[in-house]
Image (cartoon, rainbow, N blue to C red):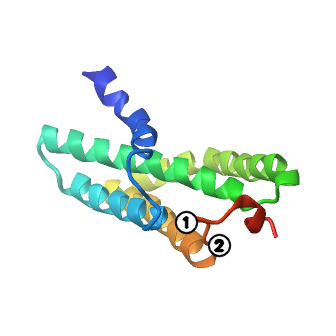
Amino acid sequence: MRGGVGGVGVQGVDLGDLRPLREVDPGEFFGEAVAVAGVLFGMAREPAAILLCGAAVTIANNWLIGIFHTYQAELYPTRIRARAVGFVFSWSRLSSIFVGFWVAALLKHSGVPAVFVLISSAMLVIVVMVGALGPRTNGVRLEELSQ
């Protein structure tokens, strides 16, 4: 059972290839999917509901991560793309060191709902900022984005 549940997260990225995203902003879709699944997960009391909602959150998160990293790479000119993406990714890894400590402290002092609010708020800020400030890349050639 444990191996089956753990393997669900990997499927999120694979499923991303099945949905046509030309008409829909992927950040909005997956941001909404994470929010809905997260709220349902928080309200679930039965083991089956907890597993299904937790799997949905994991799949949507992995899908969002796969889309975000692809989108991020499109933002930089080709000549510096690898260096720029590596720089940004390194800062995200460095900041993730501290997130575990913040989550543990928040969990100890305020409980599970506060942790959910922290994580969902951070994800919401990312989705809104990318949606509001990021350029549209659907259907645009990389050469045009680099200008």
Q: Nearer the viewer, residue 85 or 37?
A: 85
For residue 29, which quarter of the picture?
bottom left
Residue beneath label 1, please?
126
For residue 17, which quarter of the picture?
top left
Residue beneath label 2, please?
135
Please say whether residue 108 is visible from this viewpoint: no
Residue 133, percent from left and from top:
63, 77
In the rendered image of this protein, does residue 93 appear above or below residue 135? above
Residue 110, percent from left and from top:
37, 59
Helix, strand or loop for disc 2: loop
Which residue is found at the position 53% from the left and 49% from the top? Answer: 65
Which residue is found at the position 30% from the left and 29% from the top? Answer: 5
Disc on the earlier residue, 2 or 1: 1
Q: Quadrant of the C terminus?
A: bottom right
Residue 46, percent from left and from top:
11, 43
Q: Amino acid at mark 1?
A: Ile
Q: Which mark is residue 52?
A: none
> How far apart, in angstroms, are the residues tagged by discs 2 and 1?
14 Å
Query: Horizontally, is 135 left or right of 115 in the view?
Result: right
Q: Amino acid at mark 2?
A: Pro
Q: Nearer the viewer, residue 46 or 101?
A: 46
